[in-house]
Image (spheres, grey):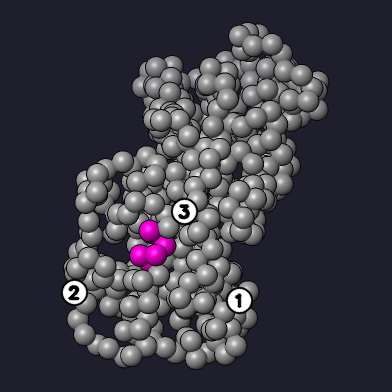
Amino acid sequence: MLAVSLRQIGMAANACRFGRRLLQTQAGSASDWQLQTAIAFDIDGVLVKGKRTLDQGRRALAMLNGDNRLNKKIPFVLMTNGGGVSEATKAADISKRLQTEIRADQVVLAHSPMQSLVKQYGDKHVLVVGGIKRRCADIARAYGFTDVSTPNDLVHWQPSLWPFMRPPANDQLSAVPGRDYAMHPFHAVMVFYDSFDFGRDLQVVTDVLRSKDATAGNDFVDRQVVPLFMSNEDLVFSNDYSQPRFGQGAYHVCLRAMWHALTNGAPLEYTRFGKPHQVQYRYSEQLLDRMAMAAVPGIDLASMRAGRCIYAIGDNPAADIAGANGAGWSSVLVRTGVFRGPPGSNDAANPATMVVDHVEDAVSWILETEAKRLDAVGSGLKTKIKARAGSPLCA
């Protein structure tokens, strides 16, 4: 159940050199926060299942807000491959459902790190794909992209572009009606969220990617003319249906297949966001750093990071566990979502540090593991760490 290696054991020993020094430097705040521990939760399949909220999720978050034997708060973020709404909207929804205050800066959506693209494309014309009506375009504008269009905008401009739907109404448009896309080339395509019309979005995206000068209506060329950025390659996800459902990754598969067929096998190049890609984990670490600085102004971040153990709790081995392992975090796999292995099993391709039944068990195991680790560190123990079930493995 516990997957370890000599390299992990060595990393654990390095992380445990931090000692009690951090606690001593947090006069007045150490009694409120345990900053040497941090947790990143997946949402669907861990805290909720579709429209159903898991009771274990409520109790797990309560433990991190101080309802534990240490009476300390533990920093955490919600790290999901979902999206299609703003971070603030997602935070408000989860806060209501889990009866715990979640701030927008604790939420990492699949497209959250795409804000970094504003530097390059903030004032360029970009095609934003996915989501309901114009919602993702509004999110992109809130991030700082000032010239945004959507597939609906193009179909409204030329209904014959995708004749299998009624022309979109004005309230579904992102751009001002009447824009002539033959005069406005694109500079990038960004898939923010799941497609709500696979056929339309496959047509529009492949059109833009292979139109001369990236201008809709121009002749096609057998090569990619603008960059493509896509979030969330999860093939399936878990909701309240009895079996996993297609995720945005299914659209990626279809897009690659269509591109291959249309361009005589030319490669489709794209940059991926979302779990398991490391950009999500680095972004989450930045949010956890900011939480630590807000809790303890003037904290020595380098020392805090050196002694911090970050745990990821997820239900999807290919996304949650693979990404956490790749980031050097400890990973905890639950059986309430995509993974349904029997007791005592682990995922063969992406084994987790620990496998438990549900998120409440995951948090209990983390708190117990961290209590042992920090007690050993604080006592100045130099004993060799053994690879055994329950051993604290800090990245």
The answer to whether residue 157 shows anywhere in this view is yes
Please indicate whether residue 283 sits to the left or right of residue 213 in the image: left
Q: Decide: few, some or many residues near mark 2? Use Cα within 10 Å; few <14, some 14-19, many ≥20.
A: few
Query: Which residue, given by chain and number where applicable, does mark 1 sit on?
Result: 295
Q: Which residue bears the numbered disc 2?
A: 386
Q: Earlier in the sequence, mark 3 or mark 1?
A: 3
Does the magenta run of residues contain 35?
Answer: no
Image location (x, y in percent) of residue 75: 53, 68
As shown in the figure, which amino acid type bears the numbered disc 1? Ala
Q: Is residue 283 above or below residue 23?
A: above
User: Which residue type does callout 2 highlight?
Assistant: Lys
Of callouts 1 and 2, the N-terminal one: 1
Q: Amino acid at mark 3?
A: Gln
CA distance for labels 3 and 1: 27 Å
Q: Nearer the viewer, mark 2 or mark 3?
A: 3
Residue 36 appears in which quarter of the rendering? Answer: bottom left
Q: Main secondary structure of the magenta part?
A: helix
Region rendered in magenta? 361-366
Return the x and y of residue 388 as percentages of the image width and height: 19, 68
